[in-house]
Image (tube, coloured by chain):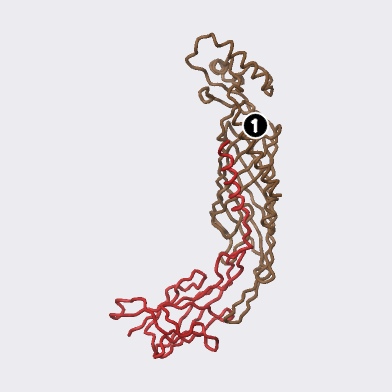
Amino acid sequence: MKYIPGIIALLLLAVFAACEDETKTCDQTLLADLGINFKKDSLNGYINKDTTWPKVTLCALDKDTIISQQARSSVYFALDPLKDSSRFYLKLDSAAVADTLTFRYTRTPHFVSPGCGFATFSTLDTVICTYHTIDSLHINNREVTSDNATNVSLYFIY
Amino acid sequence: MLRTFLYTLFISLAAVAAQAQVKKDTIPAPVKDTTHQASSNTGTKMKATAFKPIAPKDTTGLKAKSAKDSAALKGKPVVAKIADSTYLSNGGVRIGLDISRFALLYFQPYRTDITVQADVRLGQKIYGAIETGWNRTSHSTDSTYSYKGNGIYSTIGIDYDLMKKKETTEQNMLYGGIRYGIARNTYQIPHYRMTNNYWDATVEGSYPKTTVTSHWIELVFGLRVEAAKNLFLGWGVREKIMIHNGAPASHPPIVIPGYGSGTKNSQFDMTYTISYLLPLYKVKVHVPRDQKK
């Protein structure tokens, strides 16, 4: 008999766990942002270290600024959900010459969860950039989802 | 509804606790064990029981007889080894309805479920169990998406009775078991909408009707109490582990019938069942003497 209250408490917990209304709460992010990190290339590619640029400015062409003169080692931003390509302006320092990044991708509506609804996931096809400040780029992960992954690395020599 | 559910849950637990308090002297002491003799003579005479031919339901009579017999045996020398006993217990098909599915409608108003369970006694402690049910899911939000789905499912498996019986007529059971489940459901998303503030974009679309099949395994633990003659109340907890989800990863169903959330690889669930036993046959139950002590 002494175990009955404990059993009832466990069963009540079980009831609440089993009866959770998943449509009420959104426990995941709907942001499916593309991630880029910055790498400093030393010894001709033999040593690559994360690097922070002091005044990063980022925006899509003809759109509002996403990041304005902030110190960053990585940036995250959304691709255009209505088109299969997006172009971005990236200036890493006030003294540096700005570069342009072009992303070509395919879009997929993805059901994130009953509480959150849908988000647009993308699969990168091609990434093109100018090489004013950027030395090279590497695609790490083509799938742009809500997992906060770094999809592209930009390499610099300075 | 929740309160009623919890009350019935408590009542069943209390009933089991009360059963556990039943003294051992309610077990009728064997006066003459004919099993040994019968089995040694012919294999066909296994029907012989360990108890005197008193009406099996009359436990008061058995108790009185038992007390008298034990008093009469007091003066006799101690027997070195008491033989095992065998008796016949009710077997048959138990058909039930999972009433927790109706309570679930209060917590998850977007889903409607009906579940029917049945089990059949295969042996002394083994039960074959089958379950089938239907689900309808309908959810709509003005801003994000709407969803419609329905489907059927079945599970099949076995239960093992873990309870040591205090009386020969006792049919309560504390069981553990395993099930294999299969569901086939159809669903569609008539409308969804996504917005992106930076791009000032709204994306709208729909998913056509999709039919998928899913398979899973359930680990079951529960209790059944005979609340009235052949009428059982029982609760059970289940851990369901998905083996194969046939739905595409980009738009899984909200609910897989019988399993639960279509977006989870494992799922906890609870059932509360009211069921009735149709006693169709008898099952021979063998009880070693030392287990009753």
In the structure shown, which secondary structural element does the residue marked by tag 1 occupy? strand
Q: Quick check: A137 above or below B228?
A: below
B225, A129: nearer the viewer: B225
Nearest to the observer: residue A19 or residue A32: A19
Q: Quadrant of the N terminus of chain A?
A: top right
Q: Chain A's shade in the image?
A: red
Q: Position of residue A78 (x, y in %)?
A: 53, 78
| Picture quadrant where residue A113 is located | bottom right
> Viewed as shown, does residue A104 lie left or right of B120?
left
Residue B244 sits above or below residue A97 on the image: above
Badge 1 density bin: few <14, some 14–19, many ≥20, Cα 10 Å = many
* B37 shown above or below B172: above
Image position, residue A28 (x, y; %): 55, 66
Residue B111 drawn above or below residue B126: below
Q: Residue at x 41, y 89 (%)?
A: A94
Colour displayed for chain B in the image of the structure: brown
